[in-house]
Image (cartoon, rainbow, N blue to C red):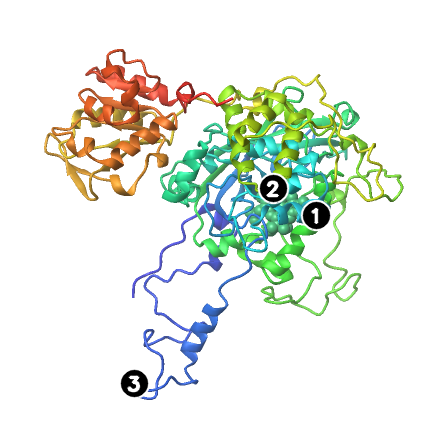
Amino acid sequence: MKKSNTPKTDNAKLRDLEKNREYSDGQYITTDHGVKINNDHNSLKAGERGPSLLEDFIMREKITHFDHERIPERIVHARGSGAHGYFESYGNVSDYTKAAFLNNTATKTPVFVRFSTVAGFRGSTDLARDVRGFAIKFYTQEGVFDMVGNNIPVFFIQDAMKFPDLIHAVKPEPHNEIPQAASAHDTFWDFISLMPESMHMVMWAMSDRAIPRSYRMMEGFGIHTFRFINAEGKSTFVKFHLKPKLGTHAVVWDEALKISGNDPDFHRRDLWDNIEMGNFPEWEFGVQLVAEEDEHKFNFDILDPTKLIPEELVPVTPIGKLVLNRNPDNFFAETEQVAFHPGHIVPGIDFSNDPLLQGRLFSYTDTQLSRLGSPNFHEIPINRTIAPMHNNQRDGHMRQEINVGRVSYSPNSLNDGYPAQAKEAEGGFVSHYERIEAHKVRERSESFSDHFSQAALFFNSQTEPEQNHIIKALRFELSKVETVAIRERMLGLLSNVSAELATKVASGLGIAVPKQPQKPMNHGIGADADPKKHEPKPIDTSYKNSDALSMVKNPTTTNSIETRQVAFLCADGVSEKSLNALKKALESKGAAAKIVGPHAGSITGDAGTEIKVDFAFFSSSSVLFDAVFVPAAKDNSQLTENDNVIEFINDAYRHCKVIGFDNGLNDLIKATTIGNKWNDGKDNSLPGIIINNGNAKSFTDDFTTQMGRHRIWEREPKISE
Ligand code: HDD
């Protein structure tokens, strides 16, 4: 009998998870109760051709377990992918928080992170236009802290009371369960068009932020204002940020649609593959800090989750780094069963009175009860704290803990009063001492009524291509809405953000922007609420542009091409010199070349080397790559006469990617859409189209530098008026 694999991970050991792992290598197959099975292929029958027997406990156990394998998927964020890693503190926030994991530079805190889309079912495509969840479980020495955030810093609604309505509106429509993982339908836009508070988030959701290039290239935000509490009990308001080391990048919409067909697991695969290759995704964890006395100094309410604090007003201070370095061993046990909760906080962190956050504090535990089926979900290995855990909670479905002794109550004398309460100085959690004197009201604060200023700030802060993408996204979404009145209401709302935006969206819909009262009605208020009080405020023009809101202008954007993938379209007899020169240049910058050939298996280079093919022309597509290179071959007809190759290049051109050609491929270029603009390569001036004229150094330098621009936006056609 072979020996089992030895356990492999550091942070798993730190969390003492090894005892939960099952390594079946070299082991016999058994029943759930340990009886070795002799025949796993046939049920027990009365004679070889006879009926099956009820006494077949082995088959009954196997099929019963199978029948119950599924658990309810998450009501939102059902589609997701996770990874393990660690958080390392820079040790610079002790003035603001006493949270040990944020101050201790000597210990890495293990984390599990789950990225997700919101609207789609568990099997939906990764590339839906949607917000991405960014949930982090920090297994700190003082208990679990969950940051349950998104890749967008604001939210659609201001009060948790509206969350079921928002989600009902965006999910597939109830009568026919169409469309899957898409907001482009009547019920979503009906709701949005009546809720002016959603306009800021709508701008983000229609931008390319909602179609990321990779989970590894997304920002993360805690969204709500939280509190930091320091050792003296002083509170400071805080917003959490994660900035990806590789910069924030997206695909374009046509690409997203095609990726959904070519590889619906695109983000999941990208995360998995890069961690397997040792390209560990990394983020800088940062905070925006606002002193208590400055709570009211902004022209928005910091408790309003539809608002961000512009980084130009309050800069983000980096306080640590987050690294993902290990894939889960088992998707269900870890990624599916992980249970996040914004209410999982540790001493040094506390809540603010943001009404969206306050409602979330109820929802998450409640949902785990039906999703994971028992109040003991904290005992599932992925959810367990590494801090000592003792209390008088007992029993329930699937209890794992064997509590010893007769005492399960407090106060008690039979166990000397244990488990005992911890003083604050001993690490006991004490809620922030906040004075509240108020009437009990079911009301929205008037300070939450500015719905357009930050929507306009976001739109105005984008580059022209980014603005065009928002316009095109709104055209796409609203053109799928069948009810004309909804389209018109949306145009009315958009005109409060930007007249240009509304007019351009309207022209795509073939209608005019309706004459609309300057201040649209807010329907998201109570029956007896005073509409005047809740009238959306006009745009506050003191808002300046914020570069941090644009992916292109963002100060953290780099021209690094690390981990990017370039498709090399290669025919048999490909020039090995040319192929190897660019491959080497890419690898030296951390990017990778992938050979796409006329068939699977391998091809032979012009010097006789056998070259392994990664993908065939017919089973791949340029949307799965960041750039394209076509090296010449002895005979280029395998390229020139192949429709898949032509389409590959056409898409790469349309999606503004860098395309390199060896000299001598004019026939191929002419067969593509580049051909019309090409002039036989005489002026060699099409942006991002790079010809290798034999000077390998200049070609590879040019190719990698242009790739660092990520997209060659000047190639994108002007948007129609
Ligand atoms: Fe939520 C899951 C993020 C508002 C109720 N939410 C969930 C997940 C993320 C978020 C990332 C998936 C976690 C995972 O990977 O398992 N949710 C947010 C953000 C919000 C937000 C950033 C606003 C700022 N959520 C929100 C509200 C409610 C919920 C207002 C209810 C009142 N969310 C849930 C939930 C989920 C959930 C129903 C579904 C599965 C789960 O919790 O575990 O409880």
Q: Are marks 3 and 1 in contact (CB under 8 Å)?
A: no
Q: In the image, is 624 to the left or to the right of 642?
A: right
**Residue behind mark 2:** 483
Quarter of the image where the N terminus is located? bottom left
What is the x, y in percent for residue 416?
A: 76, 62
Q: Residue furthest top?
A: 683
| Amino acid marked by disc 2 | Thr
Q: Position of residue 146 (x, y in %)?
A: 61, 44
Instruction: Name the disc covering residue 361, or none.
Output: 1
Q: Residue furthest left?
A: 608
Q: 10 Å neighbourhood of mark 2: few (<14), some, or many (≥20)? A: some
What numbered label is drawn on residue 49?
Answer: 3
- Badge 1: few (under 14), some or many (20 or more) residues near its Cα, within 10 Å? some
Q: Which tag is nearer the camera, tag 1 or tag 2?
A: 2
Q: Is residue 705 above or below residue 70?
A: above
Q: Is residue 263 above or below residue 244?
A: below
Residue sitting at 75 percent across and 36 percent down? 522
Q: SS of the residue at dot 3?
A: loop
**Secondary element at tag 2:** loop
Instruction: Report how far apart the C-alphas of labels 3 and 1 lie in the structure.
Output: 59 Å
> Is 437 left or right of 585, judged from the image as shown?
right
Judged from this view, the residue extending furthest toward the front is 511
